[in-house]
Image (cartoon, rainbow, N blue to C red):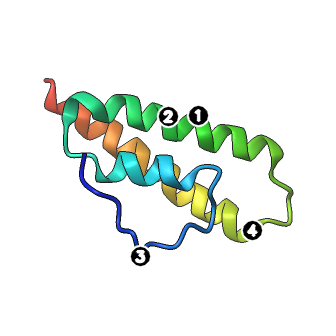
Amino acid sequence: MAPLNARSPVRYPSWQRQYEAAVLEDDPQKLHMLVSDAQAAIARRLQSLSLESCGERQAINNAVTLLRLLEREQTSSYD
């Protein structure tokens, strides 16, 4: 796995590390599991997130979009 940037601020610890691990993974064999882990962490966080948390909701929307793209790329690479 590619190393996480130690200087990267963790604003959303309940899901951000899992997301970063998936985005930075360069091993296709590990990517599916890491994307699934990140999606599960995001889903858990969404269940407890208040409606007033606009900034985190936007960050989650952006993260989910990128995770879906990673899934599509991985799926298409097997074709």
Look at the numbered discs 1 and 2 and tell me whether their residues touch, using CB distance below 8 Å: yes
Sooner in the amino-acid sequence: mark 1 or mark 3: 3
Task: Give the alpha-carbon distance from disc 1 to disc 3, as whole Å.
Answer: 25 Å
Residue behind mark 3: 7
* Mark earlier in primary sequence (3, 2): 3
Q: Position of residue 44 (x, y in %)?
A: 70, 38
Of helix, strand and loop, which one carries label 4? Answer: helix
Q: Secondary structure at mark 3?
A: loop
As measured in the structure, the alpha-carbon distance from the residue carrying label 4 to the one carrying label 3 is: 24 Å
Circle 2 packing at 10 Å, graded few (<14), some (14-19), many (20+), is some
Q: Confirm or deny contact between disc 1 and disc 3 (CB under 8 A).
A: no
Quickly name the residue at label 2: 37
Amino acid type, callout 4: Cys
Alpha carbon distance from label 2 to label 4: 23 Å
Q: Which sits earlier in the primary sequence, circle 4 or circle 3?
A: 3
Residue 50 x/y as whole percent = 86, 56
